[in-house]
Image (spheres, rainbow, N blue to C red):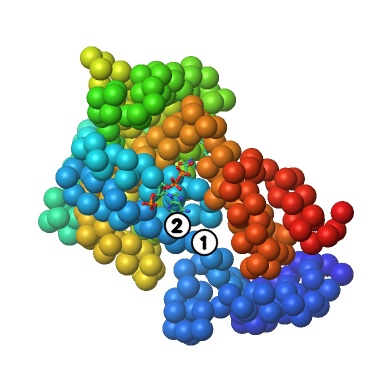
């Protein structure tokens, strides 16, 4: 039987589920039950979630946790995190507590410029194109006036439009490179609307517009965060060796892309979790962060560390195009709550908070990697997931948690201990 369908989008939610269950699950009624089990009991709330995307058939939960005790620029925060991976929230919490007694995190937005581009092809004389652009520039700005008026009143809008010659990269390729200030919004829709208005105005015979779209590479929408303390304040046991190995771990990430990718993945554990909890676009943030990590031509660490005059310093510099208005930020009740928990920050303040979450996460991972190894703490948190996969009862779970209190946790060791416990050898 063909597993393709016409008009799927027009079916009701239940019809969609029935089609899926009959075509892909042999009419297994349990599949329908699992999907419906995740529907929200409140139909209004469910409707809201149904409409976030298309062809919704259920909800996919991701845990929503809190990392308390973050002291950032002298202000206390409890940071919301939406993430499926164990040990991330624990690690952030541990590090927040640690640095809160050493002056906390200092963060600062460096710049907030965003970029959009109208990509086009032009075969004729370059000088003529430049003249046409120079004559047209004011009209291009005028064409966006109805869209930009409110943003200008907020202190934002279009900062500049440049004609860029890209013919050395691709034959006949030029672009209008436009920079924006979008204040408290991420700005994707605002930027795209402006670009399409500009493209429409710029079009004329001989200019073939290919596309108009914002760029998620935002090296000028940049935030910096750091922690520092005297080396001896780091950890009681051999603080100097700890600091040295920590700095070496960062240097290795800067020298070796294989390590840098994992190092930055650890940073994104913290960043994505807060980005998602606040209703922001984590794909945009991921794409922009990794592109920035490659800005020198080699993929490198997004963090850095130093020891100078007995002072340990650890910092991050990362592009984050975030919004505290627009997108899902006030539509998703939990994003709204997250922003309220953070004191309804401006987009700039949110950039600082999220950069700190990334720095804290990296500190936790490097601390673990250069001391006990990552598995000890991670597996301690992951233990309950393994136990649950085995189908253990509450009593068996407690037994296994106590059993592994002072033992090395591996998946196999847990399986063996469980088998022994239930007498299945
Ligand atoms: C996991 C810990 C924190 C345990 O650390 P610990 O020293 O065993 O923790 P503890 O039991 O002594 O508790 C100390 C504090 O840690 C936090 N904490 C401790 N347990 C919990 C918990 N259950 N729930 C919530 N918070 C917890 C909490 O703040 C607690 O204080 P309290 O609340 O008691 O005042 C530590 O070993 C750690 O930070 N490990 C690193 C974990 C990590 O980085 N995980 C990320 C996933 S691995 C990965 O994806 C990235 C990686 C590692 O590959 C990146 C890279 O390579 O760079
Ligand atoms: N490549 C990408 O990253 C793309 C992302 N998107 C999506 O676009 C969404 C974000 O777009 P936005 O334009 O930010 O959201 P949005 O379309 O909801 O617009 C936010 C609007 O809020 C208004 N506003 C009110 N007060 C403001 C203030 N203080 N500061 C700034 N604006 C204020 C402005 O009119 C602004 O345009 C996200 O959902 C994202 O996933 C869409 C297309 C492409």
Res 53 visible:
yes
Q: Which one is in front, 103 or 396?
A: 396
Is 98 positioned to the left or the right of 74 in the image?
right
Give the mark count: 2
Say if mark 2 contacts mark 1, CB within 8 Å.
yes
What x and y, as percent, mark residue 353? 29, 47
Query: Disc 2 versus disc 1: distance between alpha carbons?
Result: 6 Å
- Give the vertical position of 56 relative to 263 (above or below): below
Q: Which one is in front, 196 or 72?
A: 72
Q: Which mark is residue 82?
A: 2
Residue at disc 1, secondary structure: loop
What x and y, as percent, mark residue 244? 39, 18
Residue at disc 2, secondary structure: strand
Q: Quadrant of residue 131?
A: top left
Q: Earlier in the sequence, mark 2 or mark 1?
A: 1
Is 17 positioned to the left or the right of 336 in the image?
right
Q: Which mark is residue 62?
A: 1
**Quadrant of the frame with the N terminus:** bottom right
Label 2 C-beta lies within 8 Å of the nearest ligand 1 atom: no
Q: Which one is in front, 93 or 343?
A: 93
């Amino acid at each position: 039987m063909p597993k393709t369908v016409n008009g799927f989008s027009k079916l009701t939610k239940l019809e969609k589920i029935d089609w899926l269950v009959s075509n892909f699950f042999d009419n297994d009624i349990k599949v329908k039950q699992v999907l419906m089990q995740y529907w929200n009991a409140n139909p209004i709330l469910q409707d809201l979630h149904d409409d976030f995307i298309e062809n919704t058939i259920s909800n996919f939960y991701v845990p929503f946790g809190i990392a308390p005790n973050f002291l950032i620029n002298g202000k206390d925060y409890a940071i919301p995190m939406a993430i499926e991976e164990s040990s991330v929230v624990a690690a952030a919490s541990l590090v927040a507590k640690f640095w809160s007694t050493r002056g906390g995190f200092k963060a600062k937005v460096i710049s907030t410029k965003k970029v959009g581009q109208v990509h086009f092809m032009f075969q004729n004389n370059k000088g003529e194109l430049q003249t046409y652009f120079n004559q047209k520039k004011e009209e291009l700005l005028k064409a966006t006036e109805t869209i930009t008026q409110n943003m200008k009143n907020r202190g934002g809008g279009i900062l500049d439009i440049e004609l860029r010659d890209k013919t050395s990269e691709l034959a006949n390729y030029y672009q209008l490179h436009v920079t924006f200030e979008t204040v408290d919004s991420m700005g994707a829709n605002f930027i795209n609307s402006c670009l399409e208005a500009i493209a429409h105005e710029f079009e004329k015979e001989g200019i073939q517009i290919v596309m108009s779209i914002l760029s998620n590479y935002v090296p000028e929408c940049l935030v910096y965060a750091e922690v520092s303390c005297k080396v001896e304040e780091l950890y009681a046991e051999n603080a100097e060796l700890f600091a040295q190995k920590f700095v070496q771990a960062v240097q290795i990430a800067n020298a070796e892309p294989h390590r840098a990718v994992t190092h930055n993945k650890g940073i994104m554990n913290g960043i994505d979790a807060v980005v998602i909890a606040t209703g922001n676009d984590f794909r945009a943030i991921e794409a922009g962060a990794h592109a920035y990590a490659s800005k020198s031509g080699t993929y490198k660490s997004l963090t850095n560390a130093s020891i100078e005059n007995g002072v340990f310093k650890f910092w991050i510099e990362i592009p984050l195009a975030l919004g505290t208005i627009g997108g899902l930020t006030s539509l998703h009740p939990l994003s709204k709550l997250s922003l309220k928990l953070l004191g309804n920050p401006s987009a700039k303040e949110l950039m600082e908070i999220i950069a700190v979450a990334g720095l804290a996460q990296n500190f936790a991972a490097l601390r673990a990697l250069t001391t006990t190894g990552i598995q000890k703490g991670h597996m301690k948190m992951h233990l309950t997931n393994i136990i649950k996969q085995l189908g253990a009862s509450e009593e068996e779970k407690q037994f296994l948690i106590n059993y592994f209190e002072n033992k090395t946790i591996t998946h196999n060791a847990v399986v063996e201990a469980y088998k022994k416990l239930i007498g299945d050898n």
